[in-house]
Amino acid sequence: MATRAATGARAGRGSSRPAREEAGPGSTLTREQKLELYYYMRLTRSLEERLVNLYRQTKVVGGLFRSLGQEADAVGSAYALDRARGDVLSPLIRNLGSMLVQGATPLEILRQYMAKGDSPTRGRELNIHFGSPDRGFIGQISHLGDMVPVMAGVTLSFRIRQQDRVGLVYVGDGATSTGAFHEGINFAAVQRCPLVVIVENNGYAYSTPVHRQTAAAELKDKAAGYGIPGERADGNDVLAVYDVTRRAVDRARRGEGASLIELVTYRRKGHAEHDNQSYVPEGEIERWARENDPLTRYVERLTGAERVPAAELKEIDARVLREIDLATDEAERSPVPQSEDALVGIYADPATIEPLWFREGIRSAVEGHERPASWGTHDPDTAAATEDA
Amino acid sequence: MPEITYLEGIRQALFEEMERDENVFCLGEDIGKYGGAFKVTEGLLEKFGEDRVIDTPVSEAAIVGAAAGASHMGMRPVCEMQFIDFISCGYDMLTNYVATARYRAMLPCPMVVRGPSGGYVRGGPFHSQNPEAAFLHTPGLKIVYPATVSDAKGLLKSAIRDDDCVLFFEHKYLYRRVKEELPEGDHVVPIGKARTAREGSDVSVISYAATLWKALEAAEQCEREDGLSVEVIDLRTLLPLDDDAIVATVKKTNRILLVHEDTRTGGIAGEITARINELAFEWLDAPVLRVTAADVPLPYAPSLEDYVLPQTPDIVRGIRRLAAY
């Protein structure tokens, strides 16, 4: 199954020359790398479209979370890491693209969403809540902001062990209001952890707009309070996202500590597929779709300034669909988890906990119990007489 | 070997484990140059340096979360809560992130969260807590609460070597009050095993931490004054509970008094009672009784604190009631 790089050139990404602005966005990237960015953005979008179909066929278990319109920020930022050096990221719910860049496969994503027994979490966790530290991504939990302290610790270990590795963690505009975000980014700043904190400002946390989340003019302004660099970039321009992230990654790798990056983007779908977005002002979604779609913009860039023939992009699109088709067939054939597997792996020791007696009929509360020899010899009349005496 | 205190036992365990394994490191508030609020980590910074003895901001969620992240990478962090009361600030991290990590994501969290716990020291409501019940119903965590110097040292070494997160509660009343001579060499006490602190045949008292010593006092008194043979079980590990040891003492004495310093409602004694009911109901000759703190935030004034917390005479009354049943 070919779900990896479009060009096979990705081993070199993030380790090319330091990013420089003068020559325009993405000037440090090769043609192959730029096409690879396109591949991951297209894969993200098409895979989510496939998931929508499966959701409507009730094959997706539970909710479906889209990143429509945010593909550039997830892909461009993750691409600035260097997986060959062991960089690690922790995605948020709209960062499917970043996981694909780190090597998550469409098959894994589909099995996860379909709660299959051979999914990365064996049916224990939802949607894209999974990780693979060996491939450089650590799964999120639902509690927003919690991954910031965790990634502070991951990158603290890099610093202590003097490893040449960098970490990156995604939060949304909503998570910047949590205590965990504050504690984690402050800890990383004080400890000079090689950590890049990406604040993905997509306008809404569920239904709450950013101006009800913070009184700060811009989310990047929060960096000043932590004494770390803060930058803001157009999250729908994948090359700009790459450049700004790459600067922060380079700073971290040079030992200059943590950075905060605000990527301005827009959430075109609801919080999850069920959300009708009634709280969004009329026309807002359509305007972003029409004027500021990251894929449309990038196609224009590639076929324009980068002089990539449109047919070459079409080939990538077709390959993406073939990969997704193959993965869908395979995921549908996957088995559901065995129920008893629910009792395995809470601890390293014991590796499995015992089933409850009413499930398995063993260790019953009454049946088969050993009883003292005196059991059943109690005589109420004798006992009463003894008490009277 | 000279006698050492409970606190020195903990410090020795930290020193020895940090020397044994370079992946072990400590983080917490004021634990470096200052040596910690109770001086448990005194000397660690000088010996192991700033990268392995990390003074952190006042951020319990970040301390626990960062420890989890580092533990994913193969390190073995030991977090100090300056007072265990502040572990509540890391509750989300511990229960939602750490405790679930292995199960939901196959991510190991070999880490320890330790700190001074418990009352009898006039610490008031926020420097006297016993938080075990708050974590007892969280699958994925382990809880240890030693009463002796031997267990303080040996269980901490086991906790650091354990491949899951262990909450290690240290009773601050015992820090400098109990002393013991420990054997030379690598002194390790396994997690999950209770200990018979005193053999007996008429009544069993099951306890742990500071009230274990009060239970022993009460047992002596009841033997002296009533001729009762009282067994005392020291749980040592609260999660997982040692069901075998609990059932064994039920079968032996048939009369069980549960004693803990934590408050009554929802306390661990309720869980143990339920297990006895399920596993050894037929062996009981009397209802299981509890001696615990009253259900109030722990007050400061000696006359209030002493009234709220379980005392030796309370345990004596419990033993006598069970013996007479």
Image (cartoon, coloured by chain):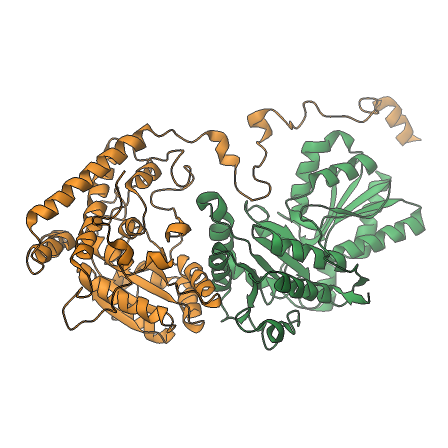
Chain colours: A orange, B green
The answer to which of B205 and B2 lies nearer the viewer is B2
- On the rendered image, what quadrant is the N terminus of chain B found in? bottom right
Judge by depth and name the residue closer to the eye, A79 or A74: A79
Q: Quadrant of residue B229?
A: top right
Q: Quadrant of residue B44?
A: bottom right
Figure check: B241 above or below A77:
above
Q: Which residue appears at 75% of the width and 68% of the height?
A: B176
Question: Measuring 34% from the left and 43% from the top, which residue is drawn there?
Answer: A127
Answer above or below: position of A326 versus A202: above
Give residue B187's position: percent from left, percent from top.
73, 56
Residue B90 makes an appearance in the image: yes
Image quadrant holding the C terminus of chain B, namely top right
Residue B141 position within the rendered picture, expressed as x and y whole percent measured from the top left: 57, 49
Is residue B309 something that shows in the picture?
no
Q: Is residue A365 left or right of residue A59?
A: right
Q: How many numbered marks are there? A: 0
User: Of B112 and B186, which appears nearest the observer?
Assistant: B186
